[in-house]
Amino acid sequence: MQKNDIIELKIEDITEQGEGIGKVSGYALFVKDTVPGDCVRAKVIKAKKNYGYAKLMEVLTPSADRVSPRCPAAGPCGGCQLQAMRYPAQLDFKRKKAGEHLRRIGGFTVLYENGPQEGPLPENTVYVEPVLGMDDPWEYRNKFLVPVRKSRDSRIITGFYAGRTHAVIETPHCFLGEAVYDEILAVVRGFMTAFGIEPYDEVSGKGVVRHVMIRKGKKTGQIMVCLVINRSKLPHADALAESLSAVPGVTSFSLCVNKDRGNVIMGDRIIPVYGEPYIEDLIGDVKYRISPLSFFQVNPEQTEKLYGKVLEYAGLTGKETVWDLYCGTGTISLFLARRAGHVYGVEIVPEAIEDARHNAAANGIGNASFFCGKAEEVMPELLKAGAEGTLTADIAVVDPPRKGCDAALIETLLEMKPAKIIYVSCDSATLARDLKMLCAEGQYAVRKVQPVDMFPQSGGIETVVELEIGKKYQEVIGNVQGDEKKSAEDQYGRMH
């Protein structure tokens, strides 16, 4: 196979990034914008020894799972890799994606049929539940981070990055967001044009406006606008504030200073300009304050399903001590607190902890405490400092960023030995890696795996996993209490 070859092939599979995979005489080709079952004509754009990449030229025979994308920019834009695939097929793909990571990286035997309801599973075997999807998988995002650039004809444009590049695809409307987002972006573009404010240029490092962040409380209707800027001040910011305040729902406008030349989008300095420096929204009946730097799930409808699974897996009776590590603004913490004995949340971002404490007070929740720092440092210190050692770790909930849990946190969890760990993951590959460490030598065992589709039309998948103390540890500690339990824990430690 050589570059520029024109070939015909059938797409047999799909990658984690949504690229179709076909073979010609055993040679694998990755073809973007294709769906398993498609018969296509494609042009080879890169040829390596055993595989290559090809550009779709024509769909000769469409797959039964192919649909017409809603968005005209769906091909070049890197945000929605799966718009050409029927939604039920997307869910099936994501289920198998999570399962394949558990098999290949985690070393588990993975089942899609005959799950736990059919009887106990063999050791190191997991059943991946069908994905919890949406009835209407569109306009679900409550947060947009949109780059601002200058077009070749010198217009101010907003849009999204093309796949694997920093080239911005001008996008008049994204079908994952609401029409009001378009109105806000139009106001920003008009403001910049009127006052001659330049967008940021990644090559030169010059320019002012880098990104526009929009967050909306889906239940409250409150909207936050935050401009990420390359300097300490935005010229004529009051004029922009006046224009934005006229947009229905906009209650907060702020600036985020980021002078770094790297790829990190947000800076760590927030300058309030208009309204409160936060918005509020609800998950279930719990109200949350959301600041520009706070983590908050982007799909509120699916978040309720996700947290519902966390609550189900925790199996709370009202007596448990729960640790929520990577707690953010306390979203999971407060969701669990009403059925737990006490919840301790740990998060490294100070602004998020401030929001979490406010959220607890605003909801009248007194059995949740929040601490700022690294979970692997804070948790052991607090357990050690507990009154006469009475502070325990019955259940640990971890919801780490895409890179997964810090290795030191995994070690801390294994040392503290909570009876149950609930792992919430936005990256099934790092999830599988961490589960392999937690389940090594029978220390923990995976009981349930539930994927949740937080990101319809894209290749991402959220997964909730329930882990329980493994048989080896149970055999050592049994049901002994007090000093006998401590002795058994020491014995288990020596064994490992």
Image (tube, rainbow, N blue to C red):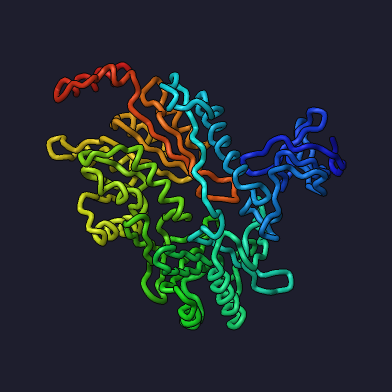
Q: Nearer the viewer, residue 14 or 85?
A: 85
Residue 127 seen in the current view: yes
Residue at the image position 47 percent from the left and 55 percent from the top: 298
Q: Nearer the viewer, residue 349 or 125?
A: 125
Please say if 131 is above or below 171. above
Residue 273 rendering spot, x and y as whole percentages = 41, 76
Residue at the image position 25 percent from the left and 45 percent from the top: 339
Q: Is residue 328 left or right of residue 477?
A: right
Please say if 159 is above or below 272. above
Residue 371 rendering spot, x and y as whole percentages = 27, 50
Hey, which residue is sitting farthest left in the picture?
Answer: 388
Q: Nearer the viewer, residue 232 or 191?
A: 191
Q: Nearer the viewer, residue 435 or 364?
A: 364
Count of labels shown?
0
Residue 348 seen in the current view: no
Residue 462 rendering spot, x and y as whole percentages = 49, 44
Residue at the image position 38 percent from the left and 21 percent from the top: 442
Q: Quadrant of residue 441?
A: top left
In the rendered image, the quadrant that contains the C terminus is top left
Q: Quadrant of residue 168?
A: bottom right
Q: Is residue 253 left or right of residue 188?
A: left
Please say if 409 is above or below 213. above
Q: Is residue 265 left or right of residue 218?
A: right
In the rendered image, the quadrant that contains the N terminus is top right
Q: Is residue 240 left or right of residue 43?
A: left
Residue 253 rendering spot, x and y as whole percentages = 44, 73
